[in-house]
Image (cartoon, rainbow, N blue to C red):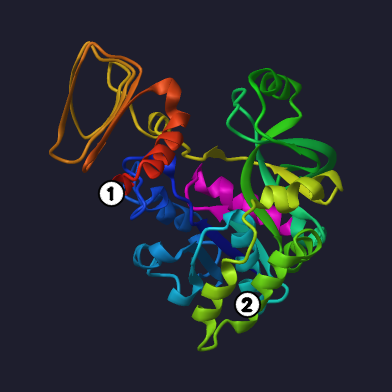
């Protein structure tokens, strides 16, 4: 049976100052009236029953996740006591799901992506489940056809064609490429043989657990012990004491890169539009602009202001004169002003806040 696992433990630091420790990006609304986490749930709710949907978040945000997703049984929303990147998250989720269904197929997705149209994602998920049943020893991922030579995404080099499922092209993966420089990204796009790495996966629970046991046996041993203790009175204490022992590493480095080179990864060409909502400029893709190209969420009055992203609290006015190409974000006790070309540097600014002891702004 098909299960779903939503990874909702990220910090969303590139969306500071709106994304804070107390309520990071995945719990916020950036367009419409549903948060990114709720939107992720909405995409799968019609396809997968509630008893087969799991959310892995941080222990600090466990109550928030349960409040936002009351439809999911509360014991299927799990809080990591400490962040250990996506390999630990994937391993824990797979071990818990396999405990309930040893033959489970799992769709793994992040809580902070925007995907449209939903029906195309559902068609792709159905096709991926079919492929996972045909190739149960393989790991599946979705590749996004690149629309420009992005340097902020990893890439997937497709290999041998495996035909189509549900009219969706399917390929073996030749290899994964980490974030390239501008010249390599241009070559990737021109070749037509590369996809953006979406970080959305489908695989048999036993297959991904086997891959983790092969490549990261210590990590696998910990999540296996936690899963065996699950449902007992000591489960919470066991999770707390064991989880911090896990190596901090992404699923890409722990499993996917080597498995791709070995021919054990399959990629489906995504038929949907995908946005990882990675920085403040994502608001331009999700919301309309005014006649001067500004994207505004909040109160703004501008003179000779163009191509800015302006965000403020309700009732807080931001006034601008003679500026362009800026990010201006006010949230509570903090305001960010940056050149839009430096959007990726916001993450570094958050690190500086930590180093200088300004924890009250995090």
Residue holding disc 2: 227
What segment carries the magenta color?
Answer: 109-130
Residue 291 in the image, given as x and y percentages of width and height: 28, 17
Q: Nearer the viewer, residue 267 or 254?
A: 254
Mark 2 touching mark 1, by CB under 8 A? no
Disc 1: CA contacts within 10 A as few (<14), some (14-19) or many (>=20): few
**Tally of numbered tags:** 2
* Residue 348 forms part of the magenta stretch: no
Q: What x and y, as percent, mark residue 362?
A: 34, 47
In-front residue for pair 208/246: 246
At 79% from the left and 39% from the top, the residue drawn is: 175
Quarter of the image where the N terminus is located: bottom right
Looking at the rendering, which quadrant does residue 169 occupy?
A: top right
Q: Which residue is mark 1?
A: 360
Would you place residue 195 above or below residue 72 in this image?
Answer: above
Residue 244 or 101: which is nearer the viewer?
244
């Amino acid at each position: 049976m098909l299960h779903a696992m939503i990874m909702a433990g990220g910090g969303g630091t590139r969306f500071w100052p709106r994304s804070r420790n107390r309520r990071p990006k995945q719990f916020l609304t950036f367009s419409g009236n549903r948060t990114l986490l709720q939107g992720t749930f909405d995409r799968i709710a019609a396809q997968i029953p509630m008893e087969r949907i799991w959310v892995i978040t941080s222990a600090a945000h466990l109550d928030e996740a349960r409040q936002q997703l009351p439809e999911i049984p509360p014991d299927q929303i799990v809080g990591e006591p400490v962040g250990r990147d996506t390999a630990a998250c994937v391993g824990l989720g797979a071990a818990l799901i396999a405990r309930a269904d040893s033959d489970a197929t799992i769709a793994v997705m992040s809580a902070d992506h925007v995907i449209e149209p939903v029906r195309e994602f559902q068609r792709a998920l159905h096709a991926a489940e079919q492929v996972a049943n045909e190739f149960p020893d393989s790991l599946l991922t979705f590749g996004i056809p690149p629309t420009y030579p992005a340097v902020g995404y990893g890439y997937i080099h497709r290999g041998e064609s495996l035909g189509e499922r549900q009219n969706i092209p399917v390929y073996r993966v030749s290899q994964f490429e980490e974030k390239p420089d501008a010249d390599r990204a241009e070559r990737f796009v021109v070749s037509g043989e590369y996809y953006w790495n979406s970080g959305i996966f489908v695989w048999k629970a036993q297959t991904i657990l086997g891959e983790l046991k092969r490549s990261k046996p210590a990590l696998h041993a910990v999540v296996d012990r936690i899963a065996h203790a699950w449902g007992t009175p000591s489960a919470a204490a066991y999770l707390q004491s064991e989880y911090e022992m896990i190596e901090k590493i992404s699923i890409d480095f722990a499993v996917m890169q080597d498995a791709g080179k070995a021919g054990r990864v399959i990629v489906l060409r995504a038929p949907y539009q995908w946005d990882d909502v990675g920085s403040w400029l994502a608001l331009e893709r999700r919301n309309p602009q005014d006649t001067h190209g500004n994207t505004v969420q909040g109160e703004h009055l501008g003179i000779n202001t163009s191509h800015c992203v302006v965000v403020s609290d309700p009732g807080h006015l931001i006034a601008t004169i003679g500026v362009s190409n800026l990010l201006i974000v006010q949230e509570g006790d903090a305001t960010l002003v940056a050149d839009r070309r430096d959007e990726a540097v916001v993450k570094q600014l958050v690190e500086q806040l930590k180093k200088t002891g300004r924890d009250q702004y995090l």
